[in-house]
Image (cartoon, rainbow, N blue to C red):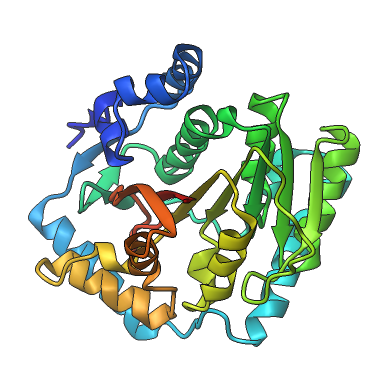
Amino acid sequence: MNNYKKIGIKKFLSLLGDTEKDFIKNSSAESYENFLKVFYENPLRYRSLTREEEKSAILQILKKIDADTQKIAEPYRVKEWEDGWNENYTSFAQSKDFNDLTPKFTRVQNLVRFDKNIIYAESEFFEKTFVKVLQNYLIYRYFSNYKNMYEFGCGSCINIIETATKLPNINLHGTDFVAPPVNILRELNSNFFKNRIESSLFDMMNPDYNLKIKENSCILTSGAIEQLASKYDKFIDYLLLNKPDLCIHIEPIYEFYSDDTLLDFVTKKFHSQRNYSSGLYNKLKELEKDEKINVITANRTSIGSLNMEGYNIIVWRVT
């Protein structure tokens, strides 16, 4: 069976709550053309699963839930993050090859999520390709409108690298709660992007208010709030005080899943089992109700790994 379909541009934009018209209106025609170039150079092809394949995939998730022992934000995880990112840093410091910054926990697989279903991707690198397209969407749709971009919980720094490469006039600031990502950023600043990248140790659960967000800035979290085990209130308070021009979250959002479909129900079990953060969307909607922020878009992209949808988008600003 090789009846593969390709995700079109209209569908891709709709997953992010966007349209061609709105993209151009809120960015520029040039930015849209730059994004289209990346989109068409990185096609996303897939086919639907047979009934038996779908049952097998869901069983695989259930077995993962049953066997899984990982708990997010536990004290022992700090050393795991330090060791993992340090492995990337050590390799990159020697090779100067951006490929060595690919997280070691990244898995390639053909079974992934799309359109609230499990699909079979033509390429085992489907998720990695999607991330590249998503990065460039954020770069040309949002980041290009600002002088500064801050990423909190920048990890392997791949978002910083892609942004610095595509937008030569933007200044970047990356933070993480362990030292190796900061060391990666210093290496990048010294050897690739001269004096354009700043870096800080920063614990999102206990924000350092000495880090001031500059004017004309947007902020990004990507799979970082996920790791806080729902202890993100202090970070949101930090953002409310610093008033960045725009806040963008690419995160798994527990509230976006339904109890009325088998796959969503199973995914909620996995999300809870891992103790990933929940309640972020509801928190932001309460702040909007209190007229403290304006939620610009909040979309379930329905794309992710086999076990969960990790790339939902929420965009908001302080009022």
Residue 90 visible to an observer of this rendering: no
In the image, 143: left or right of 191? left
Asked whether 107 or 194 is in front, the reply is 194
Number of numbered markers: 0
Q: Quadrant of the N terminus?
A: top left
In the rendered view, tell whether residue 144 sits above or below residue 131: above
Residue at 53% in and 71% down: 227
Q: Position of residue 53 (x, y in %)?
A: 17, 57
In this rendered view, identify the residue nearer to me: 68 or 133: 133
Task: Answer above or below: position of 121 versus 213.
Answer: above
- Say which quarter of the image contains residue 264: bottom left
Q: Nearer the viewer, residue 49 or 310?
A: 310
Q: Between 247 and 82, which is closer to the camera in this rendering?
A: 247
Note whether residue 180 is visible: yes
Relative to 298, residue 224 above or below:
below
Residue at coordinates 37% horizontally, 56% vertically from top-left? Answer: 305
300 shown above or below 10:
below
Question: Is residue 236 rendered to the left or right of residue 123?
Answer: right
Q: Is residue 12 left or right of residue 205?
A: left
Place of residue 304 in the rendered image (x, y in percent of width and height, measured from the top left): 36, 53
- Name the image quarter holding residue 103: bottom right
Residue 208, position as x, y percentages in the image: 74, 69
- Residue 75: x and y, percent? 65, 87
